[in-house]
Image (spheres, rainbow, N blue to C red):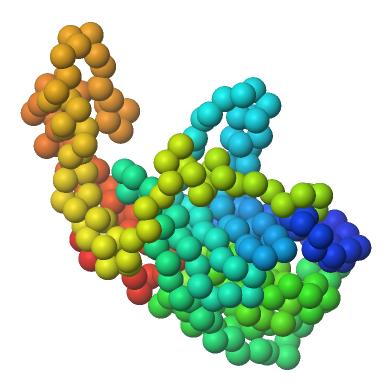
Amino acid sequence: MRKFLLVMILLSLSFNAQTHRFIYEYHFKMDSASPEKRKVSMVLDVNPDQVKFYNYDFVVTDSINKTRGENNVIWDDTPALTRKKNSTVNSNYIMIQNMFIVETNDKINWKLDNETRTIGGYKVQKATTKYGGRNWTAWFTKDINLSEGPYKFQGLPGMIFEIYDDKDNFKFSLVKSYKIPKTYETLGILENFGGQKPVKIPEARLKKLMLDYYNDPLHTFKEHYKNNTNPDAHFMVMGIEVKRPEQLKELSEMMQENIKKNNNPIEIDKAIKY
């Protein structure tokens, strides 16, 4: 039986400026046609007034920066978002060469089921929903008086321990929780990424930016390559050294194929048709 590391979540749920951190194991397919899955750890920070969800690697990098006085930044394609506590409005942080914020209203309509089971010593109840073009099954506990969960999944009468879709593309499983005495500051890893404040844009513009990027994925690189005056400079794309301009067309096509292959977002109804 899998051992869960859930530790004394209910000892105190007083919210005097502290952060209740929940760690989810996130399994997902980037390519829906492939059996291969990625696994990463995701953070759900429940603060007094706000909820934040992002990759745990950001916490690791932030800790190293604070310890060593460095200013390293990382990003990947896993979800990163914030919302007010008990709200359905999410601020989604998205990187397309630059960082953007897209605000979405994500009300989820749940259907409660009487079926129950036990996870990590907690009695959990089944709930289902259709969201983002996928059918989801969630397991939540009323023993934790937080109407929250991973990603945009919230609104149930208790904390979500596990949620997955019926095509076995995505699964979030709660594996650990602990409290941080003061509200955890994410300014350096979310709200002020790399020293720049993300630009808020409407969802329609996001789609256009994604299509523009697909149509010319090396646009920024080409400009830098063209304007380079250092004969000793080395330029790398996808681990391949660019030695002549003719390579750029082939590399662009490789990137486009990769974008199409990995076009499997959680909200499949918002997938870009490349």
The quarter of the picture where residue 51 lies is bottom right
Viewer-proximal residue among 159 and 33: 159
**Residue at point 81%, 49% (across, down):** 181
Q: Is residue 3 left or right of residue 256?
A: right
User: Is the C terminus in the top left, top right, bottom left or bottom right quadrant?
Assistant: bottom left
Which residue is outermost to the left? 246
Along the horizontal axis of the image, is 210 left or right of 89?
left
In the figure, residue 29 lies in which quadrant? bottom left
Q: Is residue 262 above or below residue 146?
A: above
Q: Position of residue 239 (x, y in %)?
A: 32, 28
Q: Is residue 153 above or below residue 208?
A: below
Rendered residue at 73%/87% (across/down): 115
When asked about the image quadrant of residue 121, the answer is bottom right
Q: Position of residue 147 (x, y in %)?
A: 69, 75
Please give left or right for residue 97 compared with residue 152 in the image: left
Q: Residue at x 69, y 49 (%)?
A: 184
Judged from this view, the residue extending furthest toward the top is: 232
Image coordinates for residue 246, horizontal then vertical, percent: 8, 28
Residue 71 picture location, percent across and down: 53, 29
Q: Is residue 47 left or right of residue 226?
A: right
Q: Say if residue 32 shows up in the picture.
A: no
Image quarter where the N terminus lies is bottom right
